[in-house]
């Protein structure tokens, strides 16, 4: 990349990323000529989501950026989730939707008005000629980035569900719809983005789409089928697709964000799942960061500073978005829903939304979720709610891991009748102890033992509660622990940075087995985090310890 003074910059793409970069650089560097290339045939799109707090930060330097008519905006402070037939409201503070079409057109007008900007409507198929720097802001399908994927280290991973981005000509409440259908779930992410228009995204796994004849047919037929399916939610309004067919979300990652004269910003550099509603804000922040770096140092240094500054932010955002995506993908394959607890799980899929934080911001919603768990209105935290497993009733869901004998660790259950230490036996070795055995016995999973017979033998020997400890290798040999006679299951936490991934095994086991599950965490969790995991239904109990094993 040239070290000569910056004089000419090309910007490919005039969406939010390209426009904000142009506005900021032209404000800070009026001496630089900026050529903006906007492709032909841009689709109208639907809406985007931002927070007013973010918009207010932007308006400090660009007061005109959000100067749109009221008809192109919609604001909200709470979100509706329709869980089956139940309507659950919860807080979502200071958010607004804006028409993508109107917002982009407004930004283009601002860009065109800058004296040092030349705006060209043309699809760019090769790098423009004599510019000192080329900013690729042309989205996830960036043509120029694709031509240089090896140099940028581009990779993409596909989501497990299909989604169809649509709009409807009415103002809906910001809503998640979780609609059980035969052997699956249809999920809707919707929000108003104008006075008389809303975004309506339908998501489902491939099997559900195939079973309900929603895939492999003309998009107009799909629109009509979905409009009938969601007639109650839409009030009879039609749906219009903004994408030509069902798509799997592509998470784009680039190892390097600049090469030679080209630098990536926005979706050309990275994508985050739409369920987080953060893609546009991240793109704008990229644009502002790069423009400001270019005012302080030569281009070669500036793009490196920009990449070092933004890449850690994006890695964190993509990790959170991956968690959110996985949560919805897992939910799409389920039919059993638990009202307020399901909504609490939806809200707490993001790490910042803990039991304490949501309780402080939306106490009535959290109290209803606790009531759903307890079966009655209580003034207790989830970890303090009693839980019955077999013939024992726990007075707390925080379970201790203790040294039973040298080399052997086990659970000590806090029951209403006092502490109960569990005996651990290996499924392969069978029962090698004198009768009677303790109240509680844990069986370590194994591949070849007659585990049902072992459970029966333990019952005969005096065990009133028998738990299954899942294999740490995740080679789970028993498809139906409940049918084998177990009362609860111990599942270890998984590697991962987020709540959803760390509790993945416990959550899946709980759903499939229908039994209470104890999350054995290798890292100590705060009481707030344990409350969050339990109320979200990702586990029923918690213990902190590296493992549980027999001698």
Image (spheres, helix red, strand yellow):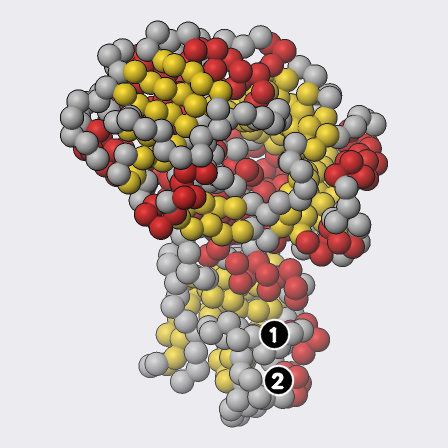
Above or below, 124 against 494 in this view is above
Where residue 12 appears, x then y in whole percent?
A: 41, 28
Which is closer to the viewer, label 1 or label 2? 2
Q: Residue, x 65% and y 32% (percent of image)?
A: 242
Residue at the (78%, 36%) spot, across then down: 220
Cα–Cα span, label 1 and label 2: 15 Å
Q: Residue furthest front?
A: 129
Image coordinates of residue 295 in percent, x first then y, are 22, 20
At 47% from the left edge and 69% from the top edge, which residue is drawn? 412
| Residue 471 horizontal side relative to residue 522, left or right | right
Q: Residues within 10 Å of mark 1 (few under 14, many from 20)?
A: many
Q: Nearer the viewer, residue 508 or 20?
A: 20
Q: Is residue 8 visible from the viewing direction of this image?
A: yes
Position of residue 342 measured from the top left corner of the image (x, y, whole percent): 64, 45
Tell me if label 1 and label 2 are in contact, CB under 8 Å: no
The answer to whether any part of residue 354 appears in the image is: no
Tag shown at residue 451: 2
Above/below status of 161 relative to 265 = below
Q: Give the image quarter of residue 376.
A: top right
Q: Secondary structure at mark 1?
A: strand
Q: Quadrant of residue 451?
A: bottom right
- Numbered tag placed on residue 465 in the rendering: 1
Earlier in the chain: of badge 1 and badge 2, it is 2
Quadrant occupied by the C terminus: bottom left
Query: As drawn, is 104 to the left or to the right of 226?
Result: left
Query: In the rendering, which numbered label is found on residue 277?
Result: none
Q: Residues within 10 Å of mark 2 (few under 14, many from 20)?
A: many
């Amino acid at each position: 990349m040239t070290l000569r003074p910056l004089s000419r910059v090309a910007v490919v793409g005039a969406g939010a990323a390209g426009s904000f970069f142009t506005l900021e650089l032209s404000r800070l560097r009026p001496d630089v000529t900026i050529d903006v290339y906007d492709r032909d045939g841009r689709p109208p799109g639907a809406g985007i989501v931002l927070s007013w707090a973010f918009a207010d930060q932007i308006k400090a330097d660009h007061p005109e950026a959000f100067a749109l008519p009221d008809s192109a905006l919609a604001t909200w402070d709470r979100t509706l989730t329709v869980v089956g037939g139940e309507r659950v409201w919860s807080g979502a503070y200071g958010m607004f939707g804006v028409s993508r079409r109107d917002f982009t057109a407004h930004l283009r007008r601002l860009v065109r008005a800058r004296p040092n900007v030349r705006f060209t409507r043309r699809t760019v198929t090769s790098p423009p000629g004599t510019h000192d720097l080329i900013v690729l802001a042309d989205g996830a399908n960036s043509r120029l980035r694709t031509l240089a994927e090896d140099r940028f280290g581009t990779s993409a991973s596909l989501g497990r569900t299909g989604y169809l981005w649509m709009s409807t000509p009415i103002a809906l409440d910001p809503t998640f719809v979780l609609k059980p259908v035969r052997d699956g779930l249809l999920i809707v992410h919707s929000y108003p983005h104008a006075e008389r228009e809303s975004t309506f995204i339908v998501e489902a796994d491939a099997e559900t789409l195939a079973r309900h004849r929603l895939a492999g047919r003309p998009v107009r037929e799909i629109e009509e089928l979905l409009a009938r399916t969601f007639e109650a939610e839409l009030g009879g309004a039609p749906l219009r697709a903004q994408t030509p067919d069902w798509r799997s979300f592509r998470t784009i990652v680039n190892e390097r964000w600049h090469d030679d004269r080209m630098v990536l910003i926005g979706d050309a550099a990275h994508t985050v799942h739409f369920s987080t509603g953060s893609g546009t804000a991240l793109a704008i922040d990229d644009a502002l960061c790069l423009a400001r770096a270019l005012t302080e140092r030569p281009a070669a240094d500036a793009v490196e500073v920009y990449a070092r500054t933004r890449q850690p932010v994006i890695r964190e955002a993509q990790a959170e978005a991956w968690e959110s995506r996985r949560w919805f993908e897992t939910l799409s394959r389920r039919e059993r829903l638990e009202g307020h607890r399901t909504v609490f799980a939806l809200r707490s899929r993001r790490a910042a939304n803990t039991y304490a934080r949501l309780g402080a911001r939306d106490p009535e919603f959290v109290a209803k979720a606790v009531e759903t768990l307890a079966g009655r209105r209580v003034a207790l935290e989830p970890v303090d709610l009693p839980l019955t497993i077999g013939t024992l009733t726990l007075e707390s869901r925080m379970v201790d891991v203790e040294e039973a004998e040298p080399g052997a660790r086990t659970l000590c259950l806090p029951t209403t009748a006092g502490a109960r230490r569990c005996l651990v036996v290996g499924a392969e070795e069978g029962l090698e102890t004198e009768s009677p055995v303790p109240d509680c016995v844990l069986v370590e999973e194994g591949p070849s033992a007659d585990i049902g017979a072992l459970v029966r033998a333990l019952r005969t020997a005096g065990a009133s509660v028998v738990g299954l400890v899942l294999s740490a290798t995740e080679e789970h040999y028993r498809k139906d622990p409940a049918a084998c006679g177990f009362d609860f299951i111990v599942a270890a936490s998984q590697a991962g940075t987020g709540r959803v991934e760390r509790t993945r095994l416990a959550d899946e086991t709980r759903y499939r087995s229908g039994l209470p599950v104890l999350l054995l965490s290798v890292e100590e969790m705060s009481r707030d985090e344990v409350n969050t995991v339990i109320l979200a239904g990702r586990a029923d109990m918690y213990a902190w310890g590296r493992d549980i094993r027999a001698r």
